[in-house]
Amino acid sequence: MKKSILLVVCICFAFHNSSLSQGSWTTKASLGSASAGRSKGASFEINGLGYIGTGYNGTARVDFWEYNPATDAWTQKANFGGAARYGAIGFAVNGTGYIGTGFATPSYVKDVWKYNVTGNSWLQVADFGGAGRMDAACFVIGNRVYIGTGYTGSTALTDFWQYNPVSDTWAPKANYAGTACASASGFSISGSGYLCLGRNAASSTYYNTLYQYDTTANTWTARANFTGAAREGAAAFVVAGNAYVGTGGSNNLGTLYNDFYKYDPIGNAWSPVATFIGSVRSHTSSFSIGNFGYVGMGYTGGQVNNLYQYNFCSVTNTVTPTPPSCNGGSNGSINLTLSSATAPYTYVWSNAATVEDITGLTAGNYSVMITDANGCTSTNTVTVTAPAAITNSVSPTNISCNSGGNGSVNLTVAGGTSPYTYVWSNATTIQDASGLAAGNYSVMITDAGGCTSTNTVVLTQPTALSVSLTSTPATCSTCPDGTATAIPAGGTAPYIYFWMTTPTIYTTPTITGILPGNYTVCITDTNNCTQCSSVSVAFNNSITEYNSHSISVYPNPSNGEFSISGLKTNAELSVYNCIGELVHKISMPRKQETVNITSLKYGIYFLKIETEDRIFTKKIILTE
């Protein structure tokens, strides 16, 4: 269904280039010879074939043609059944084509004819319900046809009519809500009719309006205005739920156009698409077959016979990124999936790759442009992200006591991709290592992606805890005036002292006022490391010889058996070792006594001889 307007002598060409946001145009076979060129022809599509007939080329035409897109060839069919005309409307319903109304010299006519494809024949049906006219607009919704606007003489019209092909009847509908016009462009999408653009022939005013018709409510609603220049005689076709409108003219056809726009009914928005590649023109014939639109013929300053195919760009793509296994790695990839496109495809990635799926990628942003066989393009951008770098920290707990084995390492891991595995230098395979001796330890962490991180830690231990002891001897074997002092070294200060004495317990480094004897102290440092040691507190021994009582010990040195002589009375003999311990004691009733201490170890001993009035001390050395 095409629309047109009066031709004028003065021609001014204006090229309106729009950015190629989608779609492309391809030149197809021209209609017959140059003499078959026309403007204001009627057109429709049936079963994947395009049809064009009637029109104007100096005179009104009656010839009718079929276009086969599979062979890109035209075939002339039976001439239109009515009088030669131009400015007629064409439409198809349920596999049957119709042409009607228009200007057939010298009248504006209202007869309508249907075309039988199988029989290649024409049959007149009920006349259009309104007045005869030319340059009307129409659209098909379901099995009903809606026709209106146009002009008769110098009067532009707004009336609209519905045609029922089954009953072959016409019924009036709500008048077009826009300004009365002719050479408007009509189309239907998803059960709604649309009418846009046009011209008021009387005032030579051009429109860029768009109205939507609701068949249920029988109402018109204004929609978004066409974003190109106001015009008449524009081509219109519908592909994949969107309308495509372009070419046309204004300024009494002194200005012609080749720009094209897509209308999205869901978003109620227009956007530019690929510019029509033929010469600027108006009052073309157009139809759509599948996902392709066709625009041809028309007025360019004269009538032309060429045809062009619009390659609808429904190239859609999805991208699925796979991140690199490791931070800083280069084994990332992007899987690209295409749909609704015509093979073969070309690919241009932002990293200069020209294949569909790209691999060996580091983290970053990547974009791709896909071009299909029709020159349709689609772009996409995707971010390939890498996992965070594996990081780890170690918190050592050092060994409490020298040569101990209670050290441990707490390991904290972040980043990478869990789960992680651990291998310690001591063959431990858990996250935190324990029961460790002092030394150097290393660990390797591996994440689920095979990325690794290492660390090394040193466990230390305190120096060995030791105790040195000093003592001050008592003045006699029964004198409580000795002292003992513990001097710790190593370990970890402060220290706790515990002298194993009874009944008094000492907890100071030095103990005083003690009798001769052995004393043991245990020292515990702040880590509960303990070291014990003993010291002997001796007593002073003076050997006193009295002239009146000469005491002899012989032999001295002795093997342990010796004699004591010079005693005047009975006596008690006590034998002490060098640390003041009593190791032997006997009574000596006789003046001379033989003593046997061979059971004692070799060394120095002190003899304490107590008589009734004296105490004598002697030193004896036991040897082999």
Image: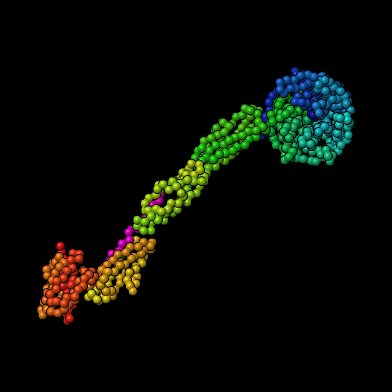
Q: Magenta region's main secondary structure?
A: strand
Residue at 10 percent across and 80 percent down: it is: 548
Residue at 78 percent across and 19 percent down: it is: 76
Looking at the rendering, in which quadrant would you find the N terminus?
A: top right
Q: Residue furthest bottom?
A: 613
Residue 90: image x %, image y %?
81, 27
Protein image colouring: rainbow
Highlighted range, magenta = 455-473
Left-right relation of 175 to 522: right
Left-right relation of 497 to 173: left
User: Vertically, is 6 above or below 532?
Assistant: above
Q: Which residue is more in the foreground, 83 or 579?
A: 579
Residue at 74 percent across and 27 percent down: it is: 289
Q: Which residue is more in the foreground, 239 or 576?
A: 576
Residue at 73 percent across and 36 percent down: it is: 263
User: Vertically, is 368 above or below 75?
Assistant: below
- The image quadrant that residue 149 belongs to is top right
The total number of labels drawn is 0
